[in-house]
Image (cartoon, coloured by chain):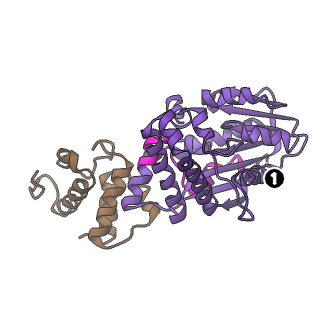
Chain colours: A brown, B purple
């Protein structure tokens, strides 16, 4: 997939963080690359066909990218891509 | 709650398989190495004694054991604490049959889901060792429904007891979110050895006991579980040839991987072991 493609229906400030989430998804579940294209901020972990382990792997990728350590209580509360995006922004993603 | 099929994956390999690497009492939960040089058998007795104290068990007590395994605690309650009556409930048919075979005096066992259990009379004390991990599923936890499920469990325990009762609860807890290779191994263990189960976060338990029970004592014991699982691993590997021959290569390899993961998870602090003394709230 071309993760650099721009969806014109998404606000520019969201497009960048969605790109980060797509790269995190491809890191966590490379065998399900088609699902990365379905990532929106409203998508739940379940809707993307992944589980809580994959969500933790995605957050681990984000931690490495941003060079931060996200507190455990925030990691275990992740239910959707919006939760992950909020965490990414909180810890430094512009 | 883990389904009966889930429970059979975890506890239904074969009673003789578990007998090869657990202690003689068949306790499949963390032991307490209080001196440090005890045998596994002695350390398991320490654990049962500690939980009896937490639940304020006396010789006259009627005690319920929720998720009673192969009956190690029922045996301890009647043989060492001389309780009036010990009742165990389990969802594992293999464990149920094994307990019937033990013919433990003053102990009875029922093959029943705790959500369907109706005691004949209320109990003076409750003990639950290593069953709480089966109460909420990973999916319920992912959806944020787990605290309500745990609270329903504590409500039932409250309804099964007399005013003034105490509850000795032992459970693995998720202490630190794993990352990298540790996450992969712990996730594998959860999926393949304990499907349908998840280690609760301690804050979820503290929230869920209310308004039924008060946390009076809380002790964590991760080094004791690292030592217990290390001893199980040593015994498993000592019986490698027998296990491979009788139960297959994959069973040996899976359990070796699982127990190695447990030792790592407790030593590294990803998981811990919590023992609670809970006092029933009656006001």
Corner quadrant of residue B220: bottom right
Give the side of residue B56 with respect to residue A68, left or right.
right
Q: Is residue B148 above or below residue A28?
A: above
Give the side of residue A59 with respect to residue B101, left or right.
left
Of the pair B228 and A75, the residue shown nearer to us: B228
Q: Residues within 10 Å of mark 1 (few under 14, many from 20)?
A: some
Q: Is residue A47 above or below residue A6?
A: above
> In this picture, which residue range is highlighted in magenta?
B188-213
As for residue A27 lying within the magenta part, the answer is no
The residue drawn where x is 43% and y is 43% is B191
Corner quadrant of residue B177: bottom left
Residue B166, position as x, y percentages in the image: 78, 47
Q: Is residue B117 visible?
A: no
Q: Quadrant of the N terminus of chain B?
A: top right
The residue drawn where x is 67% and y is 41% is B26
Q: Is residue B17 visible?
A: yes
Query: Pointer 1 indicates a residue of which chain?
Result: B
Of the pair B143 and B239, the residue shown nearer to us: B239
Residue labelled with disc 1: B53
Residue B74, position as x, y percentages in the image: 76, 38
As for residue B198 lying within the magenta part, the answer is yes
Residue placed farthest to the right in the image? B60
Residue B153, position as x, y percentages in the image: 63, 40
Residue B87, position as x, y percentages in the image: 76, 33
The residue drawn where x is 32% and y is 67% is A63
Q: Label 1, secondary structure: give it.
A: helix
């Amino acid at each position: 997939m071309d993760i650099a493609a721009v969806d014109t229906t998404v606000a520019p400030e969201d497009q960048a963080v969605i790109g980060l989430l797509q790269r995190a998804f491809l890191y966590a579940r490379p065998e399900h690359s088609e699902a990365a294209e379905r990532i929106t901020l409203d998508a739940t972990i379940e809707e993307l066909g992944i589980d809580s382990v994959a969500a933790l792997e995605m957050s681990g990728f984000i931690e490495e990218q941003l060079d931060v350590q996200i507190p455990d209580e925030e990691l275990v509360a992740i239910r959707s891509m919006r939760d992950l995006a909020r965490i990414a922004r909180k810890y430094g993603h512009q | 709650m883990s389904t009966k099929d889930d429970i059979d994956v975890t506890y239904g390999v074969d009673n003789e398989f578990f007998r090869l690497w657990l202690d003689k009492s068949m306790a499949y939960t963390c032991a307490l190495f209080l001196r440090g040089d005890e045998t596994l058998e002695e350390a398991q007795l320490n654990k049962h004694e500690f939980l009896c104290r937490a639940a304020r068990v006396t010789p006259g007590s009627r005690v319920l054991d929720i998720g009673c395994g192969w009956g190690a605690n029922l045996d301890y309650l009647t043989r060492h604490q001389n309780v009036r009556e010990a009742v165990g409930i389990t969802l594992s048919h293999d464990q149920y049959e094994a307990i019937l075979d033990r013919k433990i005096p003053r102990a009875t066992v029922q093959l029943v889901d705790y959500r369907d259990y109706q005691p004949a009379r209320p109990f003076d004390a409750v003990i639950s060792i290593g069953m709480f991990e089966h109460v909420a599923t990973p999916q319920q936890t992912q959806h944020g429904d787990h605290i309500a499920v745990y609270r329903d469990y504590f409500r039932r325990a409250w309804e099964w007891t007399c005013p003034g009762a105490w509850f000795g609860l032992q459970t693995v807890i998720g202490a630190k979110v794993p990352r990298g290779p540790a996450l992969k191994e712990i996730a594998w263990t959860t999926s393949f050895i304990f499907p349908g189960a998840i280690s609760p976060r301690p804050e979820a338990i503290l929230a869920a006991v209310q308004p039924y029970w008060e946390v009076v004592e809380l002790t964590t014991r991760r080094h004791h579980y690292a030592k217990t699982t290390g001893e199980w691993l040593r015994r498993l590997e000592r019986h490698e040839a027998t296990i491979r021959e009788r139960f297959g290569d994959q069973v040996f390899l899976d359990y070796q991987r699982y127990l190695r993961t447990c030792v790592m998870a407790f030593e590294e602090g990803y998981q811990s072991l919590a023992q609670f003394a809970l006092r029933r709230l009656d006001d």
